[in-house]
Amino acid sequence: MRVGSEDHSYKWIDNWAKIPESDSSRKGWAHPGIVVTESGNVVTCHPGDPEVMTFDSEGNFISSWRGDFADAHGITLVNEGGVEYLWIADNGSKRNHVHGYEYPPGAGDASGQVFKTTMDGEVVMRLETPPLAVYENTRYSPTTVAVHEERCGGNGDIWVGDGYGAYYVHRFTQDGEYVSSVNGEEGAGAYDCPHGIFIDYRKSEPELYVADRANARVQVYDMEGGFRRSFGDGFLTTPSGFATYGDLMIIAELRARLAVTDMNDDLLTYIGDNQQVCDVEGWPNNANDSGQIVPTSLLEAGKFNSPHGLAVDANGNLYVAEWLIGGRVTKLNRA
């Protein structure tokens, strides 16, 4: 099955990731990030467990490691001197079937964390909660990390999006020292869930893209945090994450589709558009006759349910991890 438009067509490979069968993989409410290594392996988070999994390009499970985190909500790959590392944004809480797929008691008070690991899970760096007065009364719940890598001509700055907490984007040095923050008020307006951030290297000067999800727009900055523009009015509903390939940017929209834009941030096409599924009671899952949340029965090949994590490989193939009970990772093959 092929999806997309004639100029942007992909082969849909359904249920691509062969996640080892277990009770927690079936019952866990997946909420993952996803990245592709330079060798072509794919790294994402287990649907139910604090476990980072690696798959080969065919979706075969290779290995995993467990960590001290609630959820690897955001995963970012960096390469330093030929060595790959992972940055993980843990928002601090996870919905659990034991609690009827609500958050565990006290989860609303639990802060998240941002840390860097080797590919096999050894923690090599942690970032402190930014020293802002807002965190005296608001939890820190980071969802995303972007690094201005030296191999790309950057200075190593680390940017963190607090998508579920105070709605700020924070800047740190490569050594983890806090520098500054933006919250959208310097741009198109205060953020409402800055869920995903991404450094775009398609132009002569890199830019920082912020998925201002609940405001249905993207805000764009220079690498000093200076506002440049916003876009998405009229064609984005829930931008959540980004990937680029060539001149194209692909934007994951939580409400059941991918959007493809050009160098001018103009819409070219949608992929896997299925917005009507979002109107079903219990979405991204289903609700039974008693109102209890249960796994969705509406997953279809060629149609998205809730794109959350997004990555692209060196050949332009896309990998999409969705937000739902049991999880689903789909590969979209350009060939």
Image (spheres, rainbow, N blue to C red):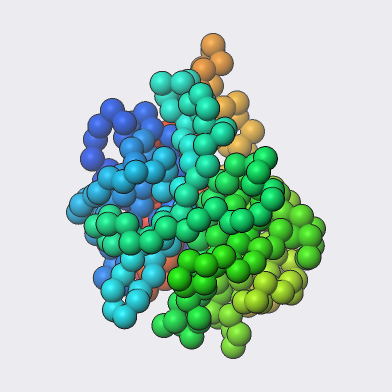
x then y, percent, for residue 19: 27, 43
Q: Is residue 142 left or right of residue 82?
A: right
Q: Is residue 256 left or right of residue 96?
A: right
x then y, percent, for residue 32: 43, 47
Q: Nearer the viewer, residue 334 or 265?
A: 265
> How many numbered discs sit on the rendered protein?
0
Q: Is residue 137 left or right of residue 127?
A: right
Q: Quadrant of residue 211?
A: bottom right
Q: Is residue 46 left or right of residue 108?
A: left
x then y, percent, for residue 163: 60, 50
Q: Nearer the viewer, residue 41 or 176?
A: 176
x then y, percent, for residue 227: 74, 72
Residue at x 67%, y 72% (from the top left corner) = 225
Quadrant position of the C terminus in the picture: bottom left
Residue extending furthest top? Answer: 290
Where 311 sits versus 321, above or below?
below
Q: Nearer the viewer, residue 57 or 49?
A: 49
Can residue 260 be spotted in the picture? no
Residue at x 45%, y 71% (from the top left corner) = 175
Can residue 122 be spotted in the picture? yes
Residue extending furthest bottom? Answer: 204
Q: Nearer the viewer, residue 230 or 263?
A: 230
Residue extending furthest left? Answer: 62
Residue at x 63%, y 60% (from the top left corner) = 169
Residue at x 47%, y 58% (from the top left corner) = 127
Quadrant position of the N terminus in the picture: bottom left
